[in-house]
Amino acid sequence: MCGIAGWVRKGGLRDGDAERVERMAEIIRHRGPDDSGVCRGGSYAFAHRRLSIIDLEGGHQPMANEDGDVWLVYNGEIYNFQELRDELVAQGHAFRTRCDTEVIIHLYEQHGDACVTRLNGMFAFAIFDERRERLLLARDRAGIKPLYYSFDGGSLGFASEAKALVGTAPAGSVRPDPRSIMDFFSLSLVQEGRTAFEGVSELRPAHTLVWDLEGRPAASRYWRPSYADKTALTGEELNGAVAALLDDAVRSHLVSDVPVGTYLSGGLDSSLVSAMARPYLPGGLNTFSAGFVGSEKVDEREYAREVAAAIGSIHHEVEVGPDDFLANLKKIIWHMDEPTLSPGVYPYYFLCGLVADSVKVVLGGQGSDELFGGYPRYRMALLEEEMKRSLKGGRLLGLVTATGEYRRRYGLGGLKNELLRLGASDERRIYEIVSGFHPRLLGRLFSDRLRREADGYDPMATFVASLEGCDSDNLIDRMLYNDFHNMLASILRTEDRMSMAHSIESRVPFLDYRLVELAASIPPSAKVSGDEPKLVLKRVAAGLVPERIITRRKQGFSAPIDSWFMGALGGEVETYLLGPESLSGGYFSRGFSERLLRRSREKRKDIWRVWSMVTFETWLRMYFGV
């Protein structure tokens, strides 16, 4: 993987522009410690940091075409680059290297901006076409690889990580974005292509952005999977189609000139990827998992060991504890660029460090839940639908049965929230199901100052508008659409930043766009039924993965922050959030913060919410502290 940066200015570069680009690249040098390069034209400067994976001797960037008037900086891997190269050679293009970077240049020469529709892989790139005085930015369909930019009316800067833009901006010119802060605590993500930094935007997945050095840059979507067009495949034919595409994706993702391994959490997804990868690596497969000091209930190592023994992998483990928690969290948030709701980022940082000791490329199972219905919330929604139908049809027994089951699973508080939204629109129900802070809590969390600065911004209204892109009216389809197009972003950000923090390349075969399109076309009833998630994927895994792994309830990769915060860290966290050095006090209601902390200590509740406040405080200190 790599890091890219650039600056383009209408009327020609000014003094300091090219130097700023070099500083931007230096800030993200962890993304590419193997090589670096810079190029400069009249209106642009590009810089690149390279992590060498394919064609170790070639592939130096920035790279130009034969005429030297089309320049590219690129981060990613194109898995169908060899087929594209053969096609381009047949069309008369001559190649100087055997890397995928040069394929993008010739593909652009052949197809223009539409070149992105031919690429199967993960990518973020910038092309400056000197003949047309025109910048093209592009990002892969799922948003696996990041790309950020800022535009001031006359110049545009871009980089693989927001910190490169923020860290080279004039002192005091960047501030937290109040709307994004509200988004983060409501949904654990930032909407509309914004970031936590005001004035820094993220190019959305499956989008290109074009600037011809006049007017404003124009972004456009080039791909969206359909949830309305359902496949005619059923039964074994459907299972076989999913298995074949996933196997092909895993095989293509193993292409590398450096050692490759897999994450192995002990869950279904990483186990299936590891089992499919093993036959393609006759020299042996290295697998990696993380566990925790002590007997923590979130530790899944026993399951990972069972899979490793079954497939015959060379297994590695790292054990994570709460020692030096805040110091380690500062490193993590610096790499993340933004606060994070998921505690799983903490052990993931150490897991990637373990991987870096043995291999340079690692495959994981991310994306499977969003495609095949792996989260408990899909079953929650089905149960709510049953309650809604029973109420509407006057079936008292069905309503009582479903209500009792809902309370058993999600508690009295969960049942209360569900009953309050029972008559609401699907969009509002989805929003409340995925929200981190329930809408009723959100209003109490924020200070008057933040609400004034946000100027009436409503995260739910923006969220509801985002669902208009889904072409299906089915509730589960719309939830899956939201999870793929919105919620997946925070997972992929963690995937990219933690791997890049240790200069390794992380690949996600489940997000091969062909598999994404097939998964979207599968009827919801073939993915989730009653209390059973991932129906199709479990049938694919039969015979490849131990039965106990297939049938176990999803746990999710997390950290035992409840026991950590209830222990020695509790007092440290309270001082961190409420002490005199706290920066987040201006954003939160102090009374609400105090009640939340007390509730987490006394009742072991709201601990994830406290975690999100801790990461926000860390982010403020990291980027805006004196």
Image: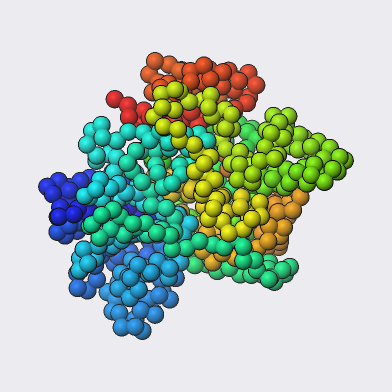
Q: Residue placed at 65% from the left, 35% from the top?
A: 297
In this rendering, position of residue 242 left or right of residue 349: right
Residue 357 vertical position relative to residue 401 in the rendered view, above or below? below
In this rendering, position of residue 237 left or right of residue 146: right
Counting the numbered discs, the total is 0
Quadrant of the image occupied by residue 95: bottom left
Q: Residue placed at 82% from the left, 46% from the top?
A: 393
Front in this rendered view, residue 577 or 462: 462
Residue 462 vertical position relative to residue 101 in the rendered view, above or below? above
Q: Residue placed at 43% from the left, 16% from the top?
A: 579
Residue 502: x, y in percent?
40, 46
Residue 227 vertical position relative to residue 89 in the rendered view, above or below? above
Residue 147: x, y in percent?
36, 52
Q: Quadrant of the C terminus?
A: top left
In the rendered image, is residue 589 in sight? yes
In this rendering, position of residue 556 left or right of residue 187: right
Q: Residue placed at 40% from the left, 75% from the top?
A: 84
Quadrant of the image occupied by residue 94: bottom left
Front in this rendered view, residue 517 or 72: 517
In the rendered image, is residue 354 in sight? no
In this rendering, position of residue 50 left or right of residue 491: left
Q: Residue furthest right?
A: 397
Front in this rendered view, residue 316 or 72: 72
Residue 16: x, y in percent?
14, 46
Residue 9: x, y in percent?
19, 53
